[in-house]
Image (cartoon, helix red, strand yellow):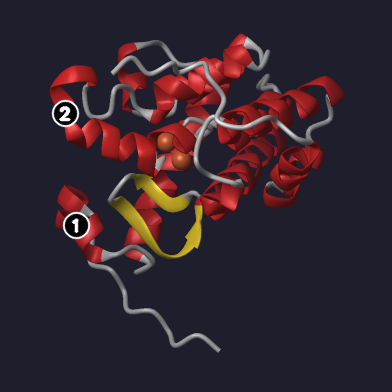
Amino acid sequence: MNFNVSCLKRPITDSVKASVVEDLPEINDITDANLRQKVIDAWAYSLCGSSFERIRDIPGEGNPGIFTLKRGTQADHLRAVARNTLNLVDDFVKHFPEISIDRDIVLTGALCHDIGKAWEFDPVNLKRWATDPSKTGQPSMRHSVFGAHVCLVAGLPEEIAHIALGHSTEGQHIGLSLECMFVRTVDHSWWDLAGAAGLLLPESMGPAQKMTRPRALKPRQ
Ligand SMILES: [Fe+2]
Ligand SMILES: [Fe+2]
């Protein structure tokens, strides 16, 4: 099967763009108006090339079937990574004002680091790859690689495409920017901490379960 990855499944509409900001309200904290608009455009492009209507429809998982949240969606993960990365950056800057870091790139990168998940988690793609993995692989490319593609197609700067690619295991093969290192570190830590706090399905934790003793959750009010 020759699948055209650049082909959108549906037109990009204003309502899709509005849903991106509803699901990721931290977009409004990006100070550069052009960057802010490009994040919306890029997420809308990613969603409209997939079967997902909006970001909060994408499952709350690290990879399909791995690190699965008992409750919450991909939007919860993205927003948490954005908030926590900024908190960490602000603490560094407060106590070490001599460091130089681009806060807008950090926030944009955090909100876009998993932008390729609409592709990697798309049930249509998962089924297609499972049908004959020998043809295009399984997956043909992970969300980090496809995410870098989306960022570049949507006109986001190289720094953001680098974060989309480098936040994940592919980042082991390249030199990482300071902003990417912050997003990557918080992203990985967030999944580890979610597991330790008992927020992940135990069967989804794989080898990570070895060093984690998940705590029981309190009953929800
Ligand atoms: Fe990721
Ligand atoms: Fe992530």
User: Quadrant where the C terminus lies?
Assistant: bottom right
Residue at figure coordinates x 74%, y 51% from the top left: 22
Task: Report if the CB atoms under discs 2 and 1 are less than 8 Å apart.
Answer: no
Horizontal side of 78 relative to 3 (left or right) equals right
Horizontal side of 77 relative to 101 (left or right) equals left
- Residue marked by disc 1: 209
The amino acid sitting under disc 2 is Asp
Which label was assigned to residue 219? none
Q: Badge 2 local density, few (<14 within 10 Å), some, or many (20+)?
A: few
Q: Write down the quadrant of residue 197 in the picture.
A: bottom left
Q: Residue furthest front?
A: 1
Q: Badge 1 local density, few (<14 within 10 Å), some, or many (20+)?
A: some
Horizontal side of 16 relative to 88 (left or right) equals right
Determine if residue 72 is in view. Answer: yes
Element under label 1?
helix
Horizontal side of 62 relative to 207 (left or right) equals right
Q: Position of residue 45 (x, y in %)?
A: 62, 27
Which label was assigned to residue 132? 2
Where 69 sits versus 32, above or below? Answer: below
